[in-house]
Amino acid sequence: MMRTARLAPLLIVAGCFMGACSSSTATTPGPVTSPADAGPAMTDAQYSSAVVGQMHDSLLKDLDALHQAAVDMQNAAPLPQGRGWSADDDAAAIANMRSAWTRARTAYEHIEGALAPLFPDIDASIDARYDDFLTNLLGSGGDTNLFDGQGVTGLHAVERILYANVTPQRVVDFEKVLPGYVAARFPATADEAADFKNKLCGKVIADAQELLDQWTPAKIDVAIAFQGLVSLMNEQREKVNKAATNEEESRYSQRTMVDIRDNLDGTTKIYGIFEPWIASKVDAADTSKDGRTIDSKIAAGFKTLGTAYSAVNGDAIPEPPPTWSSVAPSQADLATPFGQLYTQVRAAVDANVDTGVVFQMNRAALVLGFPQFQQQQ
């Protein structure tokens, strides 16, 4: 699951794509096939071009998986004659839709870090939470139609319907006080079932297709993508803590623990593409007091997070104690499974201490000449 070993030598893409060479040298190299062909050291332009090529090919696999899962989800959506969905009569179709949704969710969480800052509008459409949408739709009174693919859209809009009959009551209680709230439910009529299939699922397919169409080397800015990886690692603490207020991401299906595991898997994989470039900048003098280099500390940080996530059984984040406070948690609350997970994640990603993976990834950004992630206060 965790990958800490150095990648094999990068294949070098000829030239330097738009947006990919913000920290490159002035001379664009000709095509080479391996670091050895480039001489004693590769230039920043060569590394940047290599990262663009490998990132494009790597993330394309998850983008294809996202699109296919969205299509499968739509194909599985039932169109009962003269009625809406039935939890009993349509049980097989609902199970198939949930399976496809899970695959779509995994694919997106793998690529979220790099893609979200490059395509923020599509990210919002496909991945925003229900409360995020309502915040932006308050002027129009929220979204009264759950199925039409307008207003509230994306994977969580679909999830909210697919898991409406098993959503924990505490999640319902959190949402029902939101301005513009409409209770989640299965389609109640044949027309609503058709809208869910053709419009809401169709919107997810359209968003996934747009990502595929936009995912070209010319659109990949390696500095922005790397900053997105750092931001996603910083967000791991928030993703855990939001479970205490029932604002977590995959709250209806109760699989947010899988989300953050997938985030880590995807970030580790994409970081591995940058790792040879980072290692080329880090010599024996560029170490901290304990003698370890930046890249080794980042690998250790990923391993620490992976260990913390693996220690939790199941798909859901451990249920937070009712008295939980992220500002001043009690010792008793910190001793609970949720408190232990929060403590471990907070320490592992800390942007302000040398042992935090966000701190070290910011150091890596600095040596690459990228902007550093700034933690909002």
Image (cartoon, grey):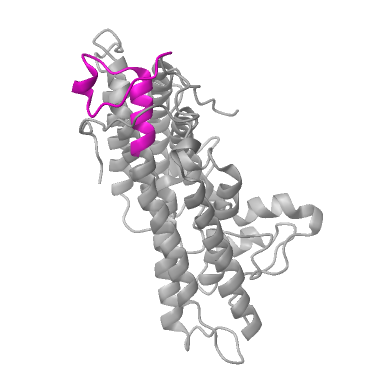
Residue found at x 34% / y 34%: 271
Residue 307: in sight, yes or no?
yes
Residue lying farthest bottom? 82
**Can the viewer see residue 257?**
no
List x then y, in percent, for residue 328: 53, 35
Residue 196 position within the rendered picture, expressed as x and y whole percent measured from the top left: 59, 73
Residue 123 lies, with reference to residue 152, above or below; the image says above
Identify the image quadrant of the C terminus: top right
Q: In the displayed structure, does residue 95 sit left or right of residue 30?
A: right
Along the line of sight, the residue nearer the viewer: 168 or 78 = 78
Kindly indicate the quadrant of the structure image that contains residue 192: bottom right
Q: Is residue 229 above or below residue 312?
A: above
Count numbered badges in the picture: 0
Closer to the camera, 154 or 310?
154
> Which contiguous range is marked in magenta?
26-54
Q: Magenta span has 28? A: yes
Q: Residue 190 in the image: x percent, y percent? A: 62, 85
Left-right relation of 205 to 306: right
Q: Let me know if residue 37 is in the magenta part.
A: yes
Residue for point 60% across, 79% down: 194
Image coordinates for residue 157, horizontal then vertical, percent = 58, 62
Image height check: is 157 above or below 210? below
Identify which residue, 88 or 69, lies in the foreground: 69
Task: Please identify the residue farthest to the front as the structure is shown.
Answer: 30
Q: Nearer the viewer, residue 133 or 366?
A: 366
- Specify whether 119 is left or right of 294: right
On the image, which quarter does residue 4 sit in?
Answer: top left
> Which residue is painted at 49% across and 22% down in the image?
372
Using the image, determine if residue 279 lies above or below residue 159: above
